[in-house]
Amino acid sequence: MIRVGIVGSTGYGGCELVRFLLTHKEVEIKWVSSRTYTDQEYSSVYASYFKLLDQKCVDENLENYLDDVDVVFFATPQGVCAKMINQNVLNKVKVIDLSADYRIKDVATYERWYGMEHASPEFIKEAVYGLCEINRNKIKQARLIANPGCYPTCSILSIYPLAKAGLIDMDTLIIDAKSGVSGAGRGAKVANLYCEVNESIKAYGVTTHRHTPEIEEQLGYASKQEVLLNFTPHLIPMNRGILVTAYAKLKEGVTKEEIEAAYQCYDDEYFVRVLDSEKIPEVRNVKASNFVDINYKIDPRTKRVVMMGAMDNLVKGAAGQAIQNMNIMFGLDEKEGLLLAPAVL
Ligand SMILES: NC(=O)C1=CN([C@@H]2O[C@H](COP(=O)(O)OP(=O)(O)OC[C@H]3O[C@@H](n4cnc5c(N)ncnc54)[C@H](OP(=O)(O)O)[C@@H]3O)[C@@H](O)[C@H]2O)C=CC1
Ligand SMILES: CC(=O)N[C@@H](CCC(=O)OP(=O)(O)O)C(=O)O
């Protein structure tokens, strides 16, 4: 059995880790930690877990609990994992960080976009960006995983086949993305109150959202600073789900067959579902599951391609992908613990 500990277990990402890990045949949840609910039963925080996970939350003194586990998930805000890990931690356990602390290779870029000093930049180089479908081989060897952001996961998986095959002009790429409110976490914020988000839709982080450099880095923009991405997220009144609609100009002479062939890179990927021709990705079809639904449409009038993706921000966008990473790291079936079907309602 793989022994698991979860730091930040009482947030939405942590709670989703618990939900999936409880069904995982090879995992034992050894401890869940919390600053706020130390010594309180997990099911007193989330009543849904009554009779499912009745253990008490431990405090956040990680070093006291390292010997009990093989892997630690950090479902904590930006900066926490970077402060809590050190060489001793990494020598003892594998670490999967759901935050952005190790996603961006250039520390100055991280510090600029996140507005904080990085507490352990010495580990950035060895961290593997845990986008399973693309970095599987590196993930197998890793002891520190930077689990990708929710918008980046959906955006990159939707666009990557065409970017990698060089079929689109990257300087024309525009990503329009939408997220449910759980993307902002469980912490109380006025902007996320029911009356602030219900019956409304708004863009936010326009031209400044911190997922922009992450997507740029993974889509290969980093080396050509003159070509940059426009990424605009929107907050929409639903609990969970991400929808990405991305637009780019096709390179001269690119054919429909070349585009089709590029998306075949996902043929053997269980969790990436490239839909049949006219079907449009929809968030409810992936709700609470680890699937990403993807499709594209060529506009012969504008010679642009529209790339579409739908995903659950808390699952493939966070906890599900983190468990998929764990499965790869420990040589398990990648699907283990992740086979919950989408919730239809
Ligand atoms: N929500 C989403 O859709 C996604 C989230 N992420 C990332 O995953 C991480 C967790 O997100 P999410 O679960 O939504 O966030 P939440 O705010 O819901 O939960 C974070 C939890 O971390 C704990 N925590 C807060 N501050 C600290 C601290 N200083 N030290 C230790 N623990 C702390 C809190 O629990 P307690 O007080 O009990 O300790 C809190 O419940 C974040 O980095 C987020 O950016 C990534 C992709 C998608
Ligand atoms: C709706 C909402 O607020 N979403 C969050 C994204 C959450 C997320 O993916 O967090 P990471 O930064 O760890 O990737 C946001 O825009 O900041």
Image: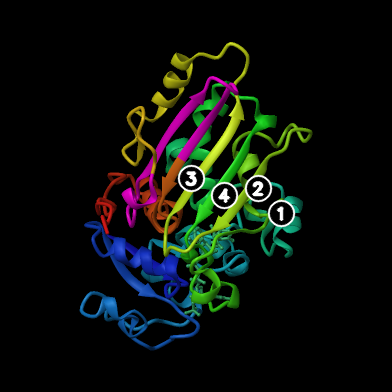
Gap in angstroms between the C-alphas marked 4 and 1: 25 Å
Task: Estimate how packed mark 4 is, as few (under 14), some (14 to 19) or many (20 or more) residues with alpha carbons within 10 Å.
Answer: many
Q: Who comes first in sequence, dot 4 or dot 3?
A: 4
**What percent of the width, then of the height, locates residue 313?**
45, 56
| Contact (Cβ within 8 Å) of mark 4 with mark 1 | no
Task: Estimate how packed mark 1 is, as few (under 14), some (14 to 19) or many (20 or more) residues with alpha carbons within 10 Å.
Answer: few
Q: Who comes first in sequence, dot 2 or dot 4?
A: 4
Q: Residue at x 73, y 33 (%)?
A: 223
Residue indicated by mark 3: 154
In which quarter of the view is residue 309 placed? top left
| Contact (Cβ within 8 Å) of mark 2 with mark 1 | yes
Segment colored magenta? 282-308
**What percent of the width, then of the height, locates residue 112?**
76, 56
Q: Amino acid at mark 3?
A: Cys
Q: Is residue 123 visible?
A: yes
**What percent of the width, then of the height, locates residue 225?**
77, 36
Q: Amino acid at mark 1?
A: Thr
Q: Who comes first in sequence, dot 4 or dot 1?
A: 4
> Is residue 243 on the magenta stretch?
no
Q: Which mark is residue 208?
A: 1
The residue tagged with tag 1: helix, strand or loop?
Answer: loop
Gap in angstroms between the C-alphas marked 4 and 3: 21 Å
> Among all residues in the image, which is located at the extreme bottom?
39
Q: Who comes first in sequence, dot 2 or dot 3?
A: 3
Residue indicated by mark 4: 127
User: From the viewer's perspective, is 16 left or right of 200?
Assistant: left
Residue indicated by mark 2: 212
Q: Who comes first in sequence, dot 1 or dot 3?
A: 3
Tell me: residue 271, above or below residue 114. above
Q: Residue at x 27, y 59 (%)?
A: 345
